Image (spheres, rainbow, N blue to C red):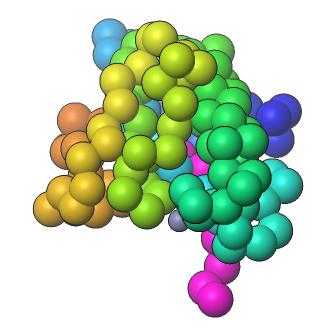
Amino acid sequence: MRVVRVFVIALLVAGVANAQKQKLKVYISADMEGIGGVITDVQADPKGHEYEKFRRLMTEEVNAAIAGAYDAGATEVLVNDGHGDSQNIDLELLDKRTRLVRAYPGPLLMMDGIDPSFDAVVFVGYHAGE
Ligand SMILES: [Zn+2]
């Protein structure tokens, strides 16, 4: 999780660097296949026997990114659950400081909810092509 926080902080410092700004909005898009520990499609499939464990891990990794964003000065964080039908992130475990987009399919799919008001974008759990 430390790597995620460092990545978020680097993004904010490099991309925003606007100390005078009152608001700092961070958009997080999360997928599941690139979450730490996910090595098979079955783990990311709601019908798979280990899916519940891996959706918890996805939520924890997203929470690490949220914490990193707030540690770096974010004032608002929006998360898009971008895997499958967008019903993966566990609402009971998700950091309560954030809002969650879980509509699928939205017009911008895994980036639904983003607009020009955001200052930084973080991708969590993304993966290489299959
Ligand atoms: Zn996915």
Tell me the quadrant of the picture where the C terminus can be found: bottom right
Tell me the quadrant of the picture where the N terminus can be found: top right
Q: For this view, does 43 lie left or right of residue 3? A: left
Q: Residue sitting at 30 percent across and 38 percent down?
A: 101
Say whether residue 14 is visible.
Answer: no
Is residue 70 depicted above or below 5 in this figure? above
Q: Residue sitting at 62 percent across and 27 percent down?
A: 63
Q: Main secondary structure of the magenta part?
A: loop
Say whether residue 124 is visible.
Answer: yes
- Along the line of sight, which residue is nearer the eye, 96 or 76? 96
Image coordinates of residue 43 in percent, x first then y, are 71, 61
Q: For this view, does 26 lie left or right of residue 13? A: left
Image coordinates of residue 67 in percent, x first then y, are 63, 20
Image coordinates of residue 29 in percent, x first then y, are 46, 49
Q: Residue sitting at 81 percent across and 68 percent down?
A: 39
Q: Residue sitting at 69 percent across and 69 percent down?
A: 42
Is residue 129 depicted above or below 23 in this figure? below
Corner quadrant of residue 84 = bottom left
Image coordinates of residue 85 in percent, x first then y, are 37, 57
Is residue 14 depicted above or below 90 in this figure? below
Q: Is residue 101 magenta?
A: no
Is residue 112 depicted above or below 102 in this figure? below
Corner quadrant of residue 75 = top left
The span picked out in magenta is 121-130
The residue most toward the bottom is: 130
